[in-house]
């Protein structure tokens, strides 16, 4: 083995050479799965792999290049910009005579909109087969035009048994042994990331005596479990999703747990606060009229005091929102109104509520501040978008709307 190979990290030396050596991802690597069949039939297309770190995105991209007899070229969106990309495009034009190029862009979500747009003409022309890797949800991080031209494949974090297999391969290469109990403990510290697990093994290996990695050696390494929450990537949206769904499900303890995961993982407290402001409107709405002001106040307070004290405010807001009555009636109402406008088109504004108005009746000049008057656009079929629930403050709102409706011939 030459020196350059020895100096490579253990994870790089153990990178699978064939598709059958890839761990996990049985949903796409099963012999009947469409992705596996496209590989074997050499009909690959531009693809975005979305999944947590260490699940095999780079390995799968390399396999696609091998199966399609294309030159594999790699860029890092963190380190490489347009100059490096343009150089690859020139190389791709030369590579057409040799079967073409598969361009792999790691962390593709780090490129901005204009950089992602620069990929489109070359993907459309077939000059390159693009394979992007991202740890963030493509719906949020990849331009719609680029998404529409790529096969979006979601990958899963590796299971404990998958990582144990990877660790066994690592032990063999390092000429050490370890019990299944030790390997399972390392797997627990790996959070589904085979690369992280192998890095742990590689760091501990020099401490091994008599060729066996024992539980005692592992415990003395004073490992701290990685909570797998990187505010910029690593399972970010999974934890955020669990946080929101726990509040929506009115489980304050679960919501506080996921919030604690984000805080300990280094999440920006203002990001958490903004999510709660959105939640207050989307999932509580008018069922509790104090929810949105409280969420906004929490966000402003966090801006003023900062961490670590801001954790107290975050906890207060989280527990209140989780325990509040829930309604998405206003959220559904605006979505339905937008859909109706897109479908129905532009209607005329009635003269009595135009500017200047002709024949407008001022509600405050009438009893109860209400007058029977039509506010709907001219000749448009009437719709009811907002349908209050019977929970919390919305019950009173519903009763008020019904009272107005009973006095009106226009609604």
Image (cartoon, rainbow, N blue to C red):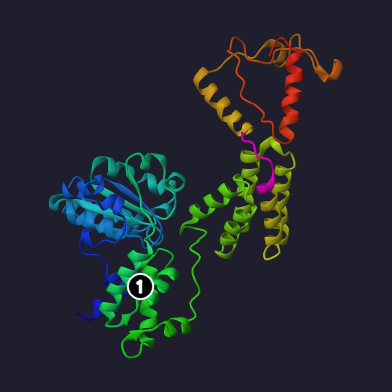
Main secondary structure along the magenta-highlighted residues? loop
Indicate the quadrant where residue 88 lies: bottom left
The secondary structure type at the circle numbered 1 is helix
Q: Which residue lies furthest to the bottom in this view?
A: 210
Q: Position of residue 114 (x, y in %)?
A: 42, 46
The front one of 59 and 216 is 216
86 sits left or right of 237 in the view: left
Residue at the image position 64 percent from the left and 52 percent from the top? 252
Q: Which residue lies furthest to the left in this view?
A: 97
Q: Where is residue 168 in the image (x, y as percent from the top left)?
A: 30, 73
Q: In this view, does 284 lie above or below 160?
A: above
Task: Please provide the residue range marked out in magenta.
Answer: 321-328
Indicate the quadrant where residue 110 lies: bottom left
Q: Where is residue 265 in the image (x, y as percent from the top left)?
A: 54, 64
Residue at the image position 41 percent from the left and 40 percent from the top? 144
Q: Where is residue 156 in the image (x, y as percent from the top left)?
A: 37, 55
Indicate the quadrant where residue 13 lies: bottom left
Quarter of the image with the C terminus is: top right
346 sits left or right of 78 in the view: right
Q: Would residue 99 be counted in the magenta stretch?
A: no
Q: Is residue 355 above or below residue 242?
A: above
Crowding near the residue tagged with mark 1, few <14, some 14–19, many ≥20 C-alpha atoms within 10 Å: many
- List the residue tagged with mark 1: 198
Q: Would residue 323 be counted in the magenta stretch?
A: yes
Q: In this view, does 96 lie above or below 376?
A: below
Quarter of the image with the N terminus is: bottom left
Residue at the image position 68 percent from the left and 47 percent from the top? 323
Q: Is residue 376 above or below residue 296?
A: above
The front one of 298 and 108 is 298
């Amino acid at each position: 083995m030459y020196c350059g190979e020895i100096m490579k990290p253990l994870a790089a030396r153990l990178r699978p050479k064939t598709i059958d050596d890839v761990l996990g991802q049985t949903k796409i690597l099963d012999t009947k799965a469409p992705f596996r069949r496209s590989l074997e039939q050499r009909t690959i297309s531009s693809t975005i792999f979305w999944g947590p770190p260490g699940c095999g995105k780079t390995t799968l991209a390399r396999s696609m290049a091998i199966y399609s007899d294309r030159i594999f070229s790699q860029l890092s969106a963190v380190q490489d910009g347009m100059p490096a990309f343009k150089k690859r495009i020139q190389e791709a034009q030369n590579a057409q005579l040799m079967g073409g190029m598969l361009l792999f862009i790691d962390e593709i979500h780090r490129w901005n909109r204009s950089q992602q747009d620069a990929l489109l003409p070359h993907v459309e022309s077939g000059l390159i087969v693009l394979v992007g890797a991202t740890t963030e949800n493509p719906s949020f991080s990849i331009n719609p035009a680029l998404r529409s031209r790529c096969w979006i494949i979601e990958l899963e974090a590796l299971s404990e048994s998958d990582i144990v297999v990877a660790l066994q391969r690592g032990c063999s290469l390092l000429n050490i042994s370890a019990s299944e109990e030790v390997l399972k403990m390392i797997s627990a510290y790996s959070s589904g990331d085979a690369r992280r697990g192998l890095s742990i093994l590689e760091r501990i290996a020099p401490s091994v005596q008599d060729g066996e990695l024992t539980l005692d050696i592992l415990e003395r390494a004073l490992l701290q479990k990685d909570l797998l929450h990187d505010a910029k990537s690593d399972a970010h949206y999974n934890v955020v999703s669990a946080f929101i769904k726990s509040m929506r499900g009115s489980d304050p303890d679960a919501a506080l747990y996921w919030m604690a995961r984000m805080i300990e993982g280094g999440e920006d407290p203002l990001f958490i606060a903004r999510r709660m402001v959105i939640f207050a409107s989307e999932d509580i709405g008018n069922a509790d009229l104090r929810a949105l002001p409280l969420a906004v106040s929490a966000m402003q307070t966090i801006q003023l005091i900062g961490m670590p004290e801001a954790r107290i405010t975050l906890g207060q807001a989280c527990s209140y929102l989780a325990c509040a009555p829930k309604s998405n009636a206003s959220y559904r109402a605006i979505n339905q109104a937008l859909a109706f406008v897109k479908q129905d088109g532009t209607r005329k504004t009635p003269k009595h509520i135009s500017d200047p108005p002709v024949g407008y009746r001022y509600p405050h000049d009438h009893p109860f501040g209400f007058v029977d008057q039509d506010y709907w656009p001219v000749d448009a079929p009437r719709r009811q978008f907002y349908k209050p629930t019977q929970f919390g403050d919305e019950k009173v709102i519903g009763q008020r709307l019904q009272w107005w409706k009973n006095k009106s011939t226009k609604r």
